[in-house]
Image (spheres, grey):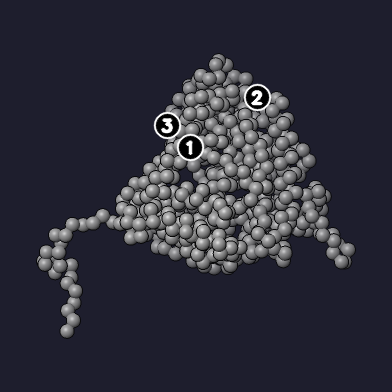
Amino acid sequence: MKMAAPTASKAASLGCNNKPAFPELDFRSGARVEELNKLIQEFTKHDQREYDDQRALEIHTAKDFIFSMLDTDFSSMASRILVDRLHAYTWGLPYRVQRKGMVQKLDQKLPVANEYLLLSGGVREGVVDLDLDELNVYARGTDYDMDFTLLVPALKLHDRNQPVTLDMRHSALCHSWLSLRLFDEGTITKWKDCCTIVDHINGATNYFFSPTKVADWFYDSISIVLSEIQKKPQRGMPKVEKVEKNGTIISIILGVGSSRMLYDIVPVVSFKGWPAVAQSWLMENHFWDGKITEEEVISGFYLVPACSYKGKKDNEWRLSFARSEVQLKKCISSSLMQAYQACKAIIIKLLSRPKAISPYHLRSMMLWACDRLPANYLAQEDYAAHFLLGLIDDLQHCLVNKMCPNYFIPQCNMLEHLSEETVMLHARKLSSVRSDPAEHLRTAIEHVKAANRLTLELQRRGSTTSIPSPQSDGGDPNQPDDRLAKKLQQLVTENPGKSISVFINPDDVTRPHFRIDDKFF
């Protein structure tokens, strides 16, 4: 006759409760979970630096410069600087512009009333699905301090009554050609030189919007505008340290005061509504159900200039759901986001050669994990270590099986093009990470510390002090006046949650005017 195992109370009475409690360990590596959690917290502390008011001003000076290049004449803006500290940390922000900008004025191609999506983090950070072979390698600390991605619609199709019809006959899943038949004759006339032309047997001519030709036009236009701006430099204007075309994106590094900011500018096609190819995704249950509305999630999508591995570069665009991802991020716990950032820092260089895995793949796996796992489990604040180990396991599983479904179009496998040799090489690399995650976390921490030290060293040397800070008075540009920063600090403290703007006359920076929400003083 079998005897039942003793219950907890019986075990206690037998003296089993006198055994020492072991710390929680990771079975695979033997690492202490508590230590991994502390390392992730340390990485987060160094990776997400707090910005003082001067840095916030410099961030927004650069943003306004980029926007003015596209939206309006910089010299007519009276150096308007927005100060809303939240803007520096959000994943993405849409900006609506209804003025003719300098790029738009060149040949009237860009829409007059436009809406841009500004994402915190560059293309190399995987904030948008643009896995380009031509991307130059820039390093934080060495080349820039902060990075952003700006999606600029070259074309918009925002009529909700007009069906979104994409030509997917010639392209892989998640990709499409774009015929200008969807648009009016005026649009076709303006963009003919940025199209590939296909003549049909019946004599009709079809113009397909070309991502490579659009990127070439955009780079040429931005180069002309920047050349004109630099002929008449204004006080407080950022210094353009680098302008490069990386495949179909334009990378600009700006120096403002003691900061260097990388902007990856991407020409896109913007749509309202939702594509038919992703319609079935809406029928499934998701982690964001009940937390945000469906209208917020499916408010629009983009075509970005990226080709599939067997597609035609001159014609093929990739569907991007960056706007939706901005909304979904609101529903992801801070501990999971910390684990994701730490995991990304570990793998981004480890798996860079040969090219196979991008940070966007990891983000997709994180979104699938949110759908798969209970919300109350993912909300645990002290589970970052578990999430990190789980993401590494998921990534290794995806590699071994050559399967990583796109989150919005699951029938699209983003890894099916990889060779067996490549996936096994990267799987072995991940196996070494999984066997000693603490050591790889320490390495990631040292890298981010080194980047921060480089930034501070360059600031001390005054590497960008030739660029007058927006706070500077007419004296020595190396000795900025901190009165404006102190005033802003006071306003931020006294007006929590409110939008604060400062308007500075470039001819007299000693007399700023402030606005809190809609009130001026």
Q: Are marks 1 and 3 in contact (CB under 8 Å)?
A: no
> Which amino acid lies under the numbered mark 3 shown in the image of this protein?
Glu
| Mark 3 → mark 2, Cα distance in angstroms | 32 Å
Q: Nearer the viewer, residue 54 or 483?
A: 54
The answer to whether 301 is drawn above or below residue 88 in the figure is below
Instruction: Please tell me which residue lies in front, 87 or 359.
Output: 359
Q: Earlier in the sequence, mark 3 or mark 2?
A: 2
Query: Of 50 and 122, which appears nearest the observer?
Result: 122
Q: Residue at x 47, y 56 (%)?
A: 429
Left or right side of 221 for 148? left
Instruction: Please give the residue where the numbered disc 3 appears in the rendered image.
Output: 494
Question: Which of the pair 90/168 is nearer the observer?
Answer: 168
Q: Which residue is mark 1?
A: 451
Q: Position of residue 518 (x, y in %)?
A: 54, 35
Mark whose residue sits in front, 1 or 2: 1
Image position, residue 465 (x, y; %): 56, 23
Would residue 64 be visible to someone looking at this image? Answer: no
Mark 1 to mark 2 CA distance (whole Å)? 31 Å
Q: Which residue is mark 2?
A: 234
**Tag nearer the camera, 3 or 2:** 2
Residue 192, position as x, y percentages in the image: 81, 50
Q: Is residue 261 left or right of residue 316?
A: left
> In percent of the image, x 70 and y 60: which residue is there?
311
**Where is residue 476, by image quadrant?**
top right
Q: Label 1's element?
A: helix
Give the secondary structure at mark 3.
helix
Residue 164, picture quadrant? bottom right
- Amino acid type, callout 2: Gln
Residue type, numbered disc 1: Ala
Within 10 Å of the Cα at label 2, are there few (<14), some (14-19), or many (20+) other Cα atoms? some
